[in-house]
Image (tube, rainbow, N blue to C red):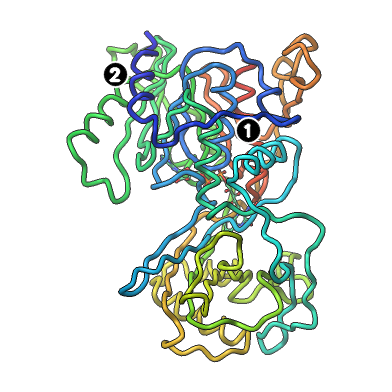
Amino acid sequence: MLCVRSVSRVCRQTRGTHAAAPVAPTALSLRQRVRTAASGTALVVGGGFAGLAAADVLVTAGMDVVLLEQGRGLGGRMCSRTVTLGSHGERVTFDHGCQYLTARNPLFDAALADLQQRGALAQWSGGLPVGAASLAEDGTVDMSTFAADTSKALWVGNPTNSAVGRALAARAGPRLSAITATRVEQLSWHPHRRAWTCRARRAGSSSGGSSSADAAIAELESTSFDCVVTAMSSVSTARLLGASSSTSTSGGEAGGGSDPLAPQVVEAAEGVRSNVCWAVMVALNRKIDVPFDGALLSRPGPGPDGGPQYGPIAWLARDSSKPGRPAVAGGAGEAWVLHGGPDWSNARRDVAPADVAAELLRDFAHLVQTPLSSADVVHLEAHRWNNAYPLNPRPPQAVQPQLQPQPAEGGSAAAAVPLGGHFMLRPEMRLAACGDWCKGPRAADAYLTGWEAATALLRL
Ligand SMILES: Cc1cc2nc3c(=O)[nH]c(=O)nc-3n(C[C@H](O)[C@H](O)[C@H](O)COP(=O)(O)OP(=O)(O)OC[C@H]3O[C@@H](n4cnc5c(N)ncnc54)[C@H](O)[C@@H]3O)c2cc1C
């Protein structure tokens, strides 16, 4: 039996954290592209772009959705760190993951337009340009090669990149219950009941547990769902689905037997490799004199894989130049984010964060030819992104004709968006897997995979 009432209770308990504001749909709004005739309950695992897009599609179609995210906030790899400095408590923020968003496909562009209307996005412009430059032989930036990228608008979260995930959840409305700091350990499909359950635990700083948190987990674990969307990195997808099971049809519910859940999805996810990326956050009480606010740095000529060659720092951004960011050192200083190059980061996967931070700070000073002493540095911290980008994203799969829009569906041309196959589906158990590993290494790719995965479930 499906426990819709139980899902509603889980929903009620968590509403308010990500309360919805009224949505003003844009011309290309995702809402006009979703058939609104579904009911039932869905579990979405992962609160990045893919998971939030999937949740939006499902609630827009009429389902009650619980989204579980192990991190403290929503947005996945697009997030920010806030630190409080010194005795007078100055706040400094760093966008240490995804840097900015650009228009890439009509669905994502519609979401960007909505987020702008909600004030959750602002254009990164008005300061110095953002672009690319070459590294000189001696490892410094060859400033003469800097080329500003003026081909597209760069959108960042307002007031920080963490605002984007929150706003994507809010635009989905009250049928979405987004629960953070909760890690899904296992999924179970029960074919006899045609229902899903999960095992979960509190994650992060709140993992110590309280009786109300324990009660919430217990309630979650006793809740059944009609369908599941996994929306995580390839590594997390393989790990979760590999630990999950389907109650054996021969053993029955009482028989206790279980089968692997989705071995093909696990195998496909295991086949997608990804890079480590070290991100260093540094706040200075002085300014750095370079003619850009952000730059991708590489050496001319193909690297070993035919792509550009990166040094220790592949990207650097004057983070405090983004709109709405707090001033550093009363306006005399700056916040910078440095991203280690892929080879450099991979080789230092197991190095201590403090050592990585110190090494990249030295390289930063060398790159920009500005001596930096410890007196100049008011904050220094490193974060390791274990699965920063998919290196060999999964090629699109052929989509069965019955999952493509039918002429009568939705009654309008706007509803007839064809699926490009950027997801994996187990139709018999209403399981869809998505995430950037199913398309490409950008937020827009992740968003599209989530949209497609959820739309495919609705077309079953
Ligand atoms: C350093 C860096 C810079 C980048 N810069 C850009 C950029 O400038 N522009 C751009 O477009 N893209 C950029 N990207 C890529 C972009 O951030 C990603 O492609 C996109 O955010 C991926 O979204 P996703 O939803 O697929 O996965 P994620 O954002 O990783 O979301 C998956 C979520 O699932 C959660 N999760 C995992 N396992 C579990 C579990 N068991 N239970 C519950 N939750 C779980 C994770 O905590 C995570 O929040 C960058 C990425 C990195 C790392």
Report helix, strand or loop for mark 2. loop
Quick check: 368 left or right of 404? left
Kind of residue indicated by mark 1: Phe
Kind of residue indicated by mark 2: Gly
Q: Which mark is residue 256?
A: 2
Residue shown at 30% from the left, 74% from the top? 87
Say whether marks 2 and 1 touch (CB < 8 Å): no
Q: Earlier in the sequence, mark 2 or mark 1?
A: 2
Report helix, strand or loop for mark 1. loop
Spatial CA distance of label 2 from label 1 is 31 Å
Residue shown at 67% from the left, 47% from the top? 440
Residue 50, image quadrant: top right
Q: Which residue is mark 1?
A: 423
Few, some or many C-alpha atoms within 10 Å of disc 2 (few <14, some 14-19, many ≥20)?
few
Q: Which mark is residue 142?
A: none
Q: Nearer the viewer, residue 72 or 202?
A: 72
Quick check: 159 left or right of 19? right
